[in-house]
Image (cartoon, rainbow, N blue to C red):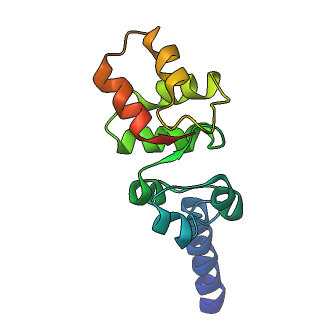
């Protein structure tokens, strides 16, 4: 009987731990992405997603290929207020010209919302074309 109680307690503990953990381990960008200072589409594809820690390490994500969560994390790291809203706006105006590192078209589209120059500069500072 004590063995049965011990087994039941172990199963309950295992279940509780499983319920509290995430369904998948966090993915990080390959070290080459961090070394380059940017998270490229290929490094994001290799890892499956870009973690908040790799965004913080590199500071930038692709405005063309990053998903909404990745963009929001990069914007948050750059100090942009309401990063989720601005991430949706960044995605809305895709694609961006690869040969425009200043993201001029994005700047023009964001200006429609009167966010202020400082906010636009923070948004663009977190992105690559």
For the image, the number of numbered tags is: 0
Q: In this view, does 44 lie to the left or right of 81?
A: right
Q: Could you tell me which quadrant the N terminus lies in?
A: bottom right
In the depicted view, which residue is nearer to us: 9 or 94? 94
Side (left or right) of 116 relative to 32: left
Rendered view: 23 above or below 126? below
Residue extending farthest to the left is 118
Q: Where is residue 129 in the image (x, y as percent from the top left)?
A: 57, 39
Q: Residue 63: give x, y in percent of width and height.
A: 58, 37
Between 4 and 17, the one lying in front of the other is 17
Find residue 88 and report its image quarter.
Answer: top right
Q: Which residue is drawn at 53% across and 47% down?
A: 61
Residue sitting at x 45%, y 59%: 37
* Residue 110 seen in this snapshot: yes
| Residue 35 higher or lower than 50, as above or below | below
Residue at (43, 31) in percent of width and height: 83
Residue pictured at 43% horizontal, 33% vertical: 124
Q: Residue 111, position in %: x, y?
A: 43, 12
Q: Could you tell me residue 3's position as x and y percent?
A: 63, 91
Query: Can residue 81 be seen here?
Result: no
Query: Residue farthest to the front?
Result: 99
């Amino acid at each position: 009987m004590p063995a049965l109680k011990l087994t039941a307690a172990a199963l309950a503990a295992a279940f509780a731990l499983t319920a509290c953990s995430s369904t998948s381990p966090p993915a990080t960008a390959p070290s080459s992405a961090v070394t380059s200072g940017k998270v490229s589409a290929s490094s994001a594809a290799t890892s499956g997603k870009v973690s908040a820690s790799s965004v913080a390490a590199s500071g930038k994500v692709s405005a063309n290929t990053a998903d909404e969560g990745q963009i929001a994390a990069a914007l948050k790291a750059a100090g942009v207020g309401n990063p989720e809203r601005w991430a949706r706006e960044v995605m809305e105006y895709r694609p961006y010209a690869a040969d425009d590192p200043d993201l001029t078209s994005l700047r023009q589209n964001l200006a429609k919302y009167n966010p202020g120059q400082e906010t636009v500069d923070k948004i663009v500072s977190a992105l690559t074309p």
